[in-house]
Amino acid sequence: MAKQRQEMLFGIRAAMEAINSEKEIEKVLIRSGLAGPLYNEFFELVREKDVPYQFVPKEKIDALDQRNNQGVVALIAPIPYQEIEDVLPEIMVSGKIPLILVLDQITDVRNFGAIARSAECAGVQAIVIPFKNSAKVTPDAIKTSAGALYNIPVCRVQNLKTLVRNFKKEGIRIVAATEKGEIMYTEANLTLATAIIMGSEDVGIEDALLRLADEQVKIPILGSIESLNVSVAASLMIYEAVRQRSL
């Protein structure tokens, strides 16, 4: 698969226009020390629209573009994110048993892409990620997913705890994969409407989110390394659901 280039917009006014037109913006890079009335107006808009941003040295901005970039670069998402409020009803009326993947604090884009590839192959109907502390749909993620990210809805939400509470109201069981789990992942009933939560390899699933799970399950680790790669663990979880549902 050919390497894709991420679309970038340079300049404060171009970035503001993109934000106001509701383009899918991955992140805005802002030169450290930038100031002035136009910058203040721009930064207020970034905060108001909750656009992810990062302050970076002048050298990083200039390395992306040598023209008059005004110290601002907006990185545009290669594909649009979807709203879980729109996707969930479509899943419900499709006649399929919901199988949704929720990713908590997974920031590596290659892990994200690999997870998406397995999820799409297994028939997962949606992947949900938080706005902050999460890998995004970047060209590298798409490449690692072998294009699967073009075919599976990716939804971003402000708060995963609110999402989980809403899922439970809709009758979707929450299964969290964690080393703290008391039962093996093969013992969980994944034939019901299910949202599987996967956490990062270093910190796992946030405790407050973990407490909302209906069931906490573990994948056995028999060797000396303490954890599996999260993309491998996610594959085991979702294909266990496929196995159970095919019986």
Image (cartoon, rainbow, N blue to C red):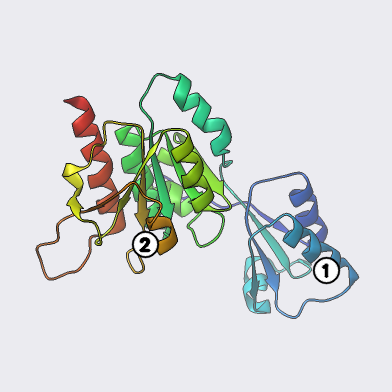
Decide: is 1 above or below 71: above
Q: Residue furthest left?
A: 222
Q: Are marks 1 and 2 in contact (CB under 8 Å)?
A: no
Kind of residue indicated by mark 1: Tyr
Mark sitting on residue 22: none
- Write the residue at 24% across / 57% down: 181
Is 87 located above or below residue 69 in the figure? above
Residue type (three-letter) at the residue carrying disc 2: Ser
Name the residue nearer the viewer: 95 or 151.
Answer: 95
SS label for mark 2: loop
Relative vertical location of residue 204 with respect to residue 82 in this rendering, above or below: below
Q: Nearer the viewer, residue 174 or 121?
A: 174
- The residue shown at (16%, 25%) is 247
- The spot of residue 124 in percent (x, y) is 36, 35
In percent of the image, x 18 and y 51: which residue is there?
A: 183
Instruction: Pick the residue in front: 242 or 68.
Output: 242
Q: Secondary structure at mark 1?
A: helix
Residue marked by disc 1: 39
Q: Quadrant of residue 207?
A: bottom left
Q: CA distance from mark 1 to mark 2?
A: 35 Å
Mark nearer the viewer, 1 or 2: 2
**Dot 1 crowding, Cα within 10 Å, few <14, some 14–19, many 20+:** some
**Rendered image quadrant of residue 132:** bottom right
Rendered-image quadrant of the N terminus: top left
**Residue carrying label 2:** 200
Looking at the picture, how far across and down is residue 71, in whole percent? 74, 70
38 with respect to 235 (left or right): right
**Mark sitting earlier along the chain (1/2):** 1
82 is higher (above) or lower (below) than 12: above
Considering depth in this image, is 201 or 138 the residue closer to the camera? 201
